[in-house]
Amino acid sequence: MPNATIHWLWLLGLSVTICGCTGVIAATAESEARWNTQYGLINTVPDSFIIHFDGDPETTVGQKNAADFFTQLRSLGISYTIGFNYTAVMNAASVKVEEKYADAMTSLSMTQNLWPVHLNSAEPLGNSSVRALPALAPLEHEITGVKKVHDTLKYTGKGVKVGILDSGLDYTHPAFGGCFKTSGCRVQYGYDFVGDSYTGSNAPVPDDDPMDQCNGHGTHVAGTLAGNDGNFRGVAPDATLGIYRVLACNSLTTSAVVLQGMLRAYKDGMQVINLSLGLSGGWGSWAEAEMANLITQKGIVIVGAAGNDGESGLFSLNSPAVAPGVVAVSAMEMPKFYSLYFNLTLEENVPIRRSDHQSYLPKLSILGKQLRPATNANGDDFGCGSVVDLAGTVGLVQRGSCSLTIKALNLIQAGAIGMVVYNNATGEPGILYFEQEISIPAFSITQVDGKYILDEIAKRGVVRVRISDDLFPFNNTKPYNTPGFTSMGPSPEGQPKPELSAPGVNIYSCLPQKMGSYGTATGSSMASPYVAGVAALLIQAGKTASTEQFYSALIHTATPQMTGDSYISAAHQGAGLVNAYGAVTSDVSYPDRFLFGGFWDDGDLYASANEYTFSKALTNTGKAAAAYTASFGYAQSLTSFDSNKQLTATPIVGTIRPKVTIKSSTSVTVKPGSTNLLKVNVNHNGIAENSFFVYSGYVLFKPTSGYTGSALSIPLAGMAYESFKAPVLPPISAGLPCLVRYSEGNCLSGTNTFTFKDGDFPAVVFRLQLPIYRLRIRIAKPSTPNQIHASVPENHYFNLAKNMRSQAVGYYTYRWDGNVYHTPYPDRIVPIVPNKDYVITFWIYVMNTRNPVLYSTPIIRVSS
Ligand SMILES: *[C@@H]1O[C@H](CO)[C@@H](O)[C@H](O)[C@H]1NC(C)=O
Ligand SMILES: *[C@@H]1O[C@H](CO)[C@@H](O)[C@H](O)[C@H]1NC(C)=O
Ligand SMILES: *[C@@H]1O[C@H](CO)[C@@H](O)[C@H](O)[C@H]1NC(C)=O
Ligand SMILES: *[C@@H]1O[C@H](CO)[C@@H](O)[C@H](O)[C@H]1NC(C)=O
Ligand SMILES: *[C@@H]1O[C@H](CO)[C@@H](O)[C@H](O)[C@H]1NC(C)=O
Ligand SMILES: *[C@@H]1O[C@H](CO)[C@@H](O)[C@H](O)[C@H]1NC(C)=O
């Protein structure tokens, strides 16, 4: 029989919600080929595992455990191939072995943990611009205090070693010194673990040279962190760099490769490591998160992007940012950003944002030419038929109605020297794509700007433009907003996350010279190197005496931002926008990153009472007394579930939250060398346990007059409900979970016979609305569906990610191939007794090993 396995299905072209009306899932139309597109758990490499053995890899005990593990596999007759041995920090190896043996491997005594090898990716930046753009000074440094740290305190990261795991770096770029590893170079360490064409499934082609020519992501983020060409200066422009290339041209990599990269950065003595892998929906206990966490316990700072899965709601952080020791960073919008533009020359120049034009055309220089609407005989401005004479002018058309290529050809026919397309809906200006090469430059602008220009033309008759390939600093309409794409905490384990925010929207930074040298990108990837740079400044400033003080300086000096009259959720913005000057100069610290409001869990955490009090002290290691007024500010409470307990695209804002009171004095003076107790009471009384809200807020310390230190804010977050009551499965009306015939896909009911041959296997299609701690799959008798009759061999599903919207919308499919084992013998796999009736029962553990949510299929008749 073929291997049973869990399949991740890509629901291409199907709608987000599966129609609950007929009980037939949308997968009916799926072809057999589609069912088989991707094997394994979400984005995993088939039959590949990382196994963590007990003990320290640098001791003989640890080494013996690893060796004994493989001896045991051989004695069980299980064949395997070792990929990599990880010989420091985490006692582990990556191993290729059939998936059906995973439970057997998990049950061996020296196994501490086992994970499938995950596929990680980041977006390649692609050819967003291939024309050289100028080196401009970053606009955000003034706001984050980085400029002040550079100018007045003269900290620039000098002497601090920063490791970057990403797509490599174009170190020949003038912002990186133009050399690699030779004396005096910025980049003193580095390695390429993958080569250009690595996909996660083929063999990596490692070499010594981490050059980035084809991707751009690594060069962009390295620019933000540490670029320096005199004018463009990153956050830590004098830091020493280690470049670990773990992403190939297409941005693919695996957790097995990333572990190697982290280990190498650690062995090279990096003090700050920025991680480029972003695996959505990760747990703090996934392999790369665990390795990252172990490295942070050795005093190395690891900073990672929160992720770009905010559209999937709460609990959508990336691994390894989700690991408790790693600093997870969200993207935040800034008041200003650079964009390509053109001027409308009215009484004064009015800059209009635009996209880039076609990469095969030269730089733009259209100065003082008329801009005319390309209207046709009907008077519409779509440019779809023959249009008015545009000789020597730039044509303005509206998007829609016909293809961009038709519009462009019509404008060329009318003599236009350029084409401006204004959007027919809201949205940013995007690069225009044509089916053939178009000889006149063409670019897009927003709908609002298009309408504005049409008004001006209506008023004035003639309007002229000046178009060049320069950039202009535009005002942002949503300064200090946490954009919807940024992933949200808490971690699947319930811990408050992310730690803080940094500039991450329309960020101007370096690109490989082949891709234009400089350019703009957006994402939490752009935010995390900013904080990694600030961490380097803190290290240079000597803020390293205690781990707690270091993280407190970095996190608690951040500035929480508001939306309306409450703070943005701490599950989205963390402690707020990074404040480099505050961090470097602050002497007062609080030991915990967050006040963790907890969650109700069947008598566990914060168990016995609905009320509890935090009492820990602020410490002043400086020379001056620090005086503050303390207060508590509530942030939005958020839930990702509607009243039907179905996941929503945008979290719902509510007011369900505990009562939070500061019990200690709100007038706080912390003298040098002394500590001051902070007491905060959280009272959950009266909160409905089915509310599913994540609440948060900030204990705010505002300096009182005379004290010049930074304001501090300690974020508090928690869950207002019992974890196991959360709707991990969608409502029944959504039609899932359901039993299907693997080769067909209709939801089945009643009794169904399966031959377990030629694709005739039972399968369960299910969608997870929350990450889950464990899925156990059991076979039961129909009369006692909740009693275990036998277990299936692929019973090792720990720490599953929830289904994310970014993954083209989908669900998991588990296919049973008819094999079972009887606990506790996972290595004795046998076919189930035929010609009898069974059900498959899912035991879904949401956060821990208690109170599983159960689901049983309709009856499966096994036919021999
Ligand atoms: C990895 O370690 C195992 C023992 O733990 C050893 O048998 C094997 O040869 C090593 N493989 C590699 C590739 O180093
Ligand atoms: C970028 O452009 C080059 C040259 O036109 C092309 O070879 C390459 O495939 C493009 N890369 C991407 C990611 O679009
Ligand atoms: C556009 O106008 C601004 C503001 O007057 C000016 O600084 C800039 O040079 C102009 N650009 C062009 C291409 O004329
Ligand atoms: C805008 O134009 C696009 C492309 O032609 C089209 O698909 C879309 O429906 C149009 N939207 C509106 C609101 O007209
Ligand atoms: C941008 O905002 C500043 C104030 O913050 C204002 O002075 C300036 O005129 C604005 N610029 C534009 C182009 O709207
Ligand atoms: C930093 O890590 C984030 C993800 O954790 C990544 O997206 C970004 O590219 C990295 N930056 C650098 C400079 O490596």
Image (tube, rainbow, N blue to C red):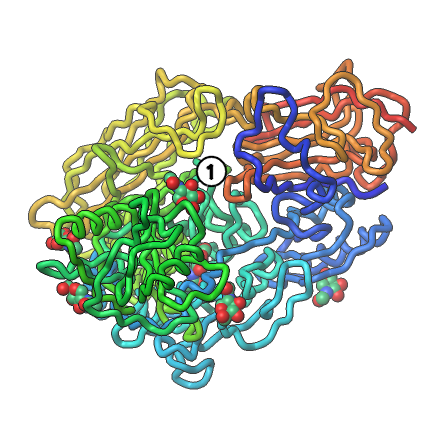
Q: Is residue 550 visible?
A: no
**Residue at 22% from the left image edge and 66% from the top image edge:** 369
- Amino acid marked by disc 1: Ser
**Residue at 41% from the left image edge and 63% from the top image edge:** 128
Spot occupied by residue 371 in the image (x, y as percentages of width and height)? 23, 59
Q: Is residue 519 visible?
A: yes
Q: Say which quadrant the N terminus sits in.
A: top right
Q: Nearer the viewer, residue 125 or 229?
A: 125
Q: Say which quadrant the C terminus sits in.
A: top right
**Residue at 80% from the left image edge and 33% from the top image edge:** 761
Spot occupied by residue 712 in the image (x, y as percentages of width and height)? 23, 45
* Horizontal side, residue 705 vs residue 790: left or right: left
Spot occupied by residue 378 in the image (x, y as percentages of width and height)? 32, 44
Number of residues whose C-alpha sits closer than 10 Å to that of mark 1, classed few (under 14), some (14–19) or many (20 or more): many
Q: Which residue is mark 1?
A: 312
Please tell me whether residue 782 is drawn above or below residue 235 in the rendered image.
above
**Residue at 61% from the left image edge and 36% from the top image edge:** 811
Please tell me whether residue 517 is drawn above or below residue 578 in the rendered image.
below
Q: Nearer the viewer, residue 180 or 249?
A: 249
* Horizontal side, residue 558 vs residue 349: left or right: right
* Horizontal side, residue 454 vs residue 684: left or right: left
Spot occupied by residue 723 in the image (x, y as percentages of width and height)? 50, 27
Please tell me whether residue 97 is drawn above or below residue 646 in the rendered image.
below
**Quadrant in which ligand 3 is drawn:** bottom left
Give SS at disc 1.
helix
